[in-house]
Image: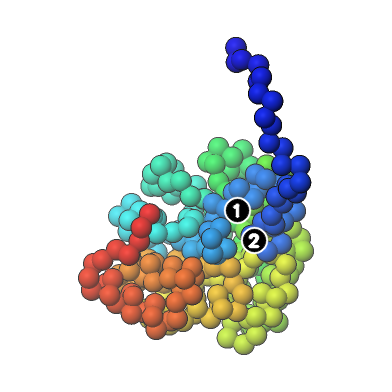
Amino acid sequence: MADADASEAKHYAADVPMRSEPFFLKGSNNLDWGMKNRLAAIFNPSSGRTVMLAFDHGYFLGPTSGLERVDLNIVPLIRYADTLMLTRGILRTSIPPTYSRGIVLRASGGPSILKELSNEEIAVSIDEAIRLNVAAMAVQVFIGGEYETRSVHNMTRLVDMGNRHGIATLAVTAVGKDMVRDAKYMRLATRMCAELGATYVKTYYVEQGFETVTAACPVPIVIAGGKKLPESEALQLAHNAIQQGAAGVDMGRNIFQSEAPVAMIQAVRSVVHENLSPNEAYDLYLELKEGGEDSFDS
Ligand code: R5P
């Protein structure tokens, strides 16, 4: 048994108000401790931003280029990511359980590229998400799509389940091929997701008025990389989005389909976390690519 505390010298600092610091993420101050703790495993608390490495594409695309062998092509990249976005199948089979950052679990699915993509259902139970110790669940939301209401309902059900257990919900705004990708559409889609409870939202960057999309969304926005671009253009895209209010990138093909994925993910990090200009980041990419160097201290 511990000795009773006999010391008379107590230090209550009664004249010092208790610290009460706001949480670093937009719109997240009123969340509970567990949710904030998980969000801090997705977003870097120092920069307030994230580089999400996305490789969940197989859930409707199968083994797309660069993802034929996750163990060989993706695992060497994971140490450079702030968080991983993936399916439970790939998490269990291919990712070392020693990975200690946040996991963003793909939680919706159903149709393949051969069918109507908006016809998704929730594809994971909350028990499974807890068992896998995930930080967030990601759900596709098809505003304007054929199954718009179903996909929104998938999101709100995941928000309810996630909030009960302190797990964040990432709403992924999917834009149909025949839809206009402009700021007006992105404002509608992202704002709807935030209003209906998403903890954060993923969308696409648009050239005109992206700052109005981030301004009108009361939770953090991350941008998808989209189709493979030349590395300099992908870095420019990331830079523009960050400078116009995005809290990070959720990037897949522009990293794992790059000629030098290890160099590319580090160059993306430099744009997101260190505000490097696109030219500086591209120079870093070339330097790392040519030198086989590693600038990362983890
Ligand atoms: C869609 O397949 C997924 O939600 C991807 O995670 C997302 O589109 C990001 O990947 P990419 O940068 O390749 O677009």
Three-letter amino acid code of the residue under disc 2:
Leu
Image quarter of residue 189: bottom right
From the viewer's perspective, is residue 229 above or below residue 223?
Answer: below
Indicate the quadrant containing the N terminus: top left, top right, bottom left or bottom right. top right
Seen from this angle, which residue lies furthest front? 8
Mark 1 residue element: helix
Residue 76 rendering spot, x and y as whole percentages? 33, 56
Q: Residue 160: in sight, yes or no?
A: no
Q: Which colour scheme appears in the figure?
A: rainbow
Seen from this angle, which residue lies furthest bottom? 208
Foreground of the two, 17 or 7: 7
* Residue, disc 1: 39
**Horizontal side of residue 129 vs 14, given as left or right:** left
Disc 1 within 8 angstroms of ligand 1 (CB) = no
Q: Which residue appears at 72% of the width and 37% of the height?
A: 12
The answer to which of marks 1 and 2 sits earlier in the sequence is: 2
Q: Tell whether label 2 touches label 1 (CB within 8 Å).
A: yes
| Rendered image: mark on residue 25 | 2
Three-letter amino acid code of the residue under disc 1:
Leu
Q: Residue 195: in sight, yes or no?
A: yes
Q: Which residue appears at 54% of the width and 51% of the height?
A: 41
In the rendered picture of this protein, how many numbered marks are placed on residues?
2
Callout 1: 10 Å neighbours few (<14), some, many (20+)? many
Foreground of the two, 232 or 267: 267
Seen from this angle, which residue lies furthest top? 1
Q: Which residue appears at 43% of the width and 49% of the height?
A: 90
Residue 236 rendering spot, x and y as whole percentages? 46, 81
Discs 1/2, front: 2
Image quarter of residue 289: bottom left
Q: Which residue appears at 33% of the width and 75% of the height?
A: 284
Foreground of the two, 165 or 181: 165
Indicate the quadrant containing the C terminus: top left, top right, bottom left or bottom right. bottom left
